[in-house]
Image: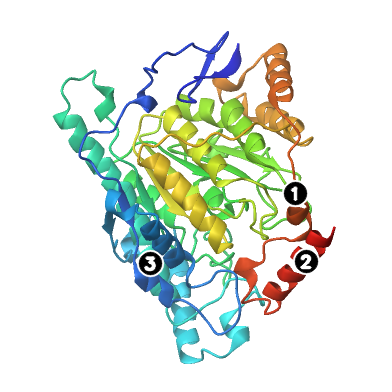
Amino acid sequence: TGPVVHRRCGSCCHRARALSHGSCSSTACRAMPRGAKPKLYYNPEMSTHTHPWAHVEKRTRASDVYEHLDRAGLLGSVQVLPGHSASDEELRTVHTQRHIDEVGRMTAAARADPTNRELCEPDGPGGVYYSGHADAAARLACGCVIDAAVGVLQDSKNATATRASPSDKARRRAPPAFAIVRPPGHHAGADPTDGHHAEGFCFYNSVAVAAGVVLASGDAQKVAILDWDVHHGNGTQSLFYEEGRCLYISLHRFGERWYPETGAASETGGGGGQGRNLNVPWTSDGLADSDYLAAFRLVLCPVLAQFSPDLLLLSAGFDAADGDAQGKMKVTAAGFAQMTQLLLSAVDCPVAAALEGGYNSRVTCESCEAVLRVLLGSAPPATPPTLLAPSVEPTLRSVLAHNAPHWSGLRYSEKALQDFFAEAARVGSAPRVSKRQRTAPAFADEERANPRAAEQQKLAEKRAARE
């Protein structure tokens, strides 16, 4: 059998042909309980973490998103909550006390000597940076994600207790939650050696800690983490690599010395976590909506459905967005919205999302808005399918080869795979790139790092106009 998709809801199933839905009966297409508001976690105190030198992980990353959502009129549709500061006990569900102490020690050192760049940027300019507020901001980010995870599980339990009948699955899943947080977290915890607990702009692994908290409390028996940040979440993988109760899935750029140089398809988990780690390692730049959606339909959704988690956590990094110079990918806001809908269709458990990377303010804001609209119940906007990049089929075949032994839903016949990629080629069209896009990359969010960025963009636009 081959992977097919519900025409209305986008949910993956395995049957000979797509179901002809007049009105979809899948759980994902049903409305959330009436009157329920999704929760959005945000605390302005996270912006206190900053330092004097230009850096892409800017203090305004989260506040820019929050203000954008306000201008878009979406804050009235959510319950805004400030979160709490994560405790040592919560952090220790995944991190060592040595890790926690070191972040505290480095924060104190940066507070005492804030202009010592060698001290504040221990990995060199452009890497993780410490400030006098690093520990406090990271604990707030972590606490927001913990509250989002615990909150959706509790709301789901309450909704289940009050639903009309045991078969009323429409009320099984509570409204999703979204934590608009920074600094990001998914690299933290990858390296246990002294002096390297924090890396990649990350201090505490917020999503991993949230998973650790609900697993330790028994609020969830199985947790899935889906990470679409363009960089591999080496911290999350490392922390759960031998944990059978947590499924970690990551789509990321890989090879050619892409940071953090981990996340091969062959890394599928160890010990009691065999098969619980799944990597989709993209080997080329410029991948777009259709490339990512192919991975969701062929690989990710079937695995999530088979795992059937009690909670799905989304590490929502937007540095794979079109216009983010850090990621060099071409995923649109509509593409992120469609991926979100596919996730909601694949599982019927509570869902909580958390901001990870994303360093172009405009496209990060637009992408967060698109994801939130889907979490609020709107249908994602359609985008015309494009031809898959040449690297996509070999990458996905490699992922299937390494993971099919652990997941029966990935054991496709060769004919099914051939049909899947043939259909993608049949409906796809070559992506159109304007002359302006080719000659004028987006500099908007790098202006602080490069004072001449705006000037360079204007010159590029003039050259494009003359051509």
Secondary structure category for the residue under label 3: helix
Classify 370 as above or below 109: above
Q: Earlier in the sequence, mark 1 or mark 3?
A: 3
Mark 3 burial class by Cα count in 10 Å: few <14, some 14-19, many 20+ = many
Please tell me which residue is depicted at 36% across the width and 59% down the height of the picture.
Answer: 70
**Quarter placement of the C terminus:** bottom right
**Quarter placement of the N terminus:** top right
Q: Earlier in the sequence, mark 3 or mark 2?
A: 3
User: Which colour scheme appears in the figure?
Assistant: rainbow
Classify 312 as above or below 23: below
Q: Which residue is mark 2?
A: 462
Secondary structure category for the residue under label 1: loop
Residue 184 placement (x, y as % from top left): 49, 61
Classify 143 as above or below 391: below
The kind of residue tagged 2 is Lys
Residue 434: give its label: 1
Count of numbered badges drawn on the protein: 3
Q: Nearer the viewer, residue 56 or 92?
A: 56
Give the Cα distance between marks 3 and 2.
Answer: 46 Å
Mark 1 burial class by Cα count in 10 Å: few <14, some 14-19, many 20+ = few
Q: Earlier in the sequence, mark 2 or mark 1?
A: 1
Residue 325 placement (x, y as % from top left): 68, 60
Quarter location, residue 68: bottom left
Please tell me which residue is depicted at 34% across the width and 66% down the height of the picture.
Answer: 43
Classify 150 as above or below 162: below
Q: Which residue is mark 3?
A: 139
Q: Nearer the viewer, residue 241 or 356?
A: 356
Please tell me which residue is depicted at 47% across the width and 58% down the height of the picture.
Answer: 205
Give the Cα distance between marks 2 and 1.
Answer: 14 Å
